Amino acid sequence: MNIDKENRVGQGRGRGKTISKNSESGSQQRSHTVTNTKKETRFQWFFQRAEMPDGQYDPETGTGLLCIEELSKKDKGIYRAMVSDDRGEDDTILDLTGDALDAIFTELGRIGALSATPLKIQGTEEGIRIFSKVKYYNVEYMKTTWFHKDKRLESGDRIRTGTTLDEIWLHILDPKDSDKGKYTLEIAAGKEVRQLSTDLSGQAFEDAMAEHQRLKALAIIEKNRAKVVRGLPDVATIMEDKTLCLTCIISGDPTPEISWLKNDQPVTFLDRYRMEVRGTEVTITIEKVNSDDSGRYGVFVKNKYGSETGQVTISVFKHGDEPKELKSM
C-alpha cells in the first residue's frame, strides 16, 4: 500500500530535504525528514542506485542524515532517500550534478577563503615557510597567487608553493637578504577575493633565519652521526662448540669508531674473538662458543656528531639441550 502523503520524504508538514556545508572540514551533509512513521519504518540512502550503508536515521526525530567527508567530483550523481514499511514506500531524489554541484563547490570555496588565517612565518630545515591555515581548500574552485613586493611569484629553484586540504603555503629555500620584504597571498573563490599580507623583514626575518640555521644544523647532525642501521637480532641462540657470526650495518660521517661490549664491558679481540670491518659492514665472530660466551653484547659506534649502541643477547646451550626459547614454548 502507499504511505500516506504526510509520510513523504521531503514533503508533509513543511519538512523536507536540506543540504548543509560543514565549514570546519569541507564535508557535506544531506538530510531528509519524514513524518507519520512507526517502529518498523525503514530509511535508506542510495547513490547511483547503490545503497549507502553509512547513511544514518534517527527514528525519534524522523531525520535521515548522509555525511560525505571531503566532497569531490567523484561524489557527483543522483542521491535518493527512501522510506518504507508495511504500508508501502516513498522517496525523494537530489540531483547533485551540473550547476548544483558547482554551486556547492563555489560556496565551499568562499567559506574556505573567508576562513584563511593570518599569514605565519616559520623557519624550517630547508629555509623559511610562509603559510595560512584554511578550513577547506579545493584546487578546482579556488585559486591562489603569491606576491613579493607586489611582484607575482612563480615556483622555481628556490621558491615552492602549494596547498593541502587545510593549508596554503610558500617555501623559500636557502633564504637570502633579497628575500626580505612584504609577501601577499591572494585567494580567489568565485567572486570572493581575499588578500593576506606579512612582512618578512627586521626581527621576523632574523628569527626565521635563526630557526632555519638551528634546524639545518640538527639535520646535519642527524644525517652524519654514528648509527647502527640494521642487522643485529634481539636474541641469538647457538649450540656450544659452534661458530657464531653477527653482522650489522653502520653509518656515519666521519667514519665511526667501533667497539664491542659484553655485559657493558669492552670485548678483547684475542683467540676465539675476531672483528672484521668491510665498509659499513661490521662482523664479530666467536669460535667454539661455550656457556661463558652467553650474555648481552653491544656494538658501540661514535663520531664527532654522536654515538649509538646496537644490542643483542647471546644464549649458548649444551649438546642435547633445547634452546631456552624452545623450552618456554
Image (cartoon, rainbow, N blue to C red):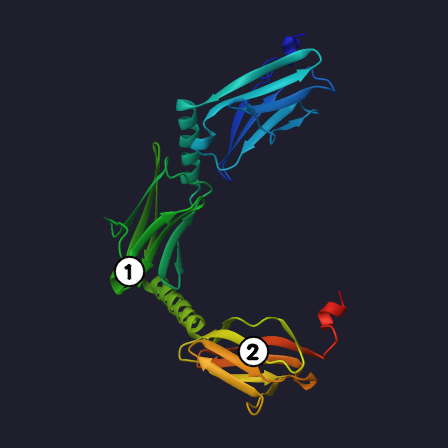
- Label at residue 107: none
Image quadrant occupied by the C terminus = bottom right
Asked whether residue 118 is in view, the answer is no
For the view shown, which residue lies furthest in the left direction? 151
Q: From what the image shows, is residue 301 above or below residue 111?
A: below
The residue beneath circle 1 is: 180
Q: Position of residue 321 (x, y in %)?
A: 75, 75
- Label at residue 245: 2
Q: Nearer the viewer, residue 315 or 90?
A: 315
The amino acid beneath tag 2 is: Cys
The amino acid beneath tag 1 is: Lys
Question: Which structural element holds mark 2?
Answer: strand
Q: Position of residue 90 (x, y in %)?
A: 61, 14
- N-terminal of the pair, mark 1 or mark 2, is 1
Mark 1 touches mark 2? (CB < 8 Å): no
Q: Residue at x 33, y 50 (%)?
A: 161
Q: Nearer the viewer, residue 172 or 98?
A: 98
Q: From what the image shows, is residue 199 above or below residue 145?
A: below
Mark 1 surroundings: few (<14), some (14-19) or many (≥20) residues within 10 A: some
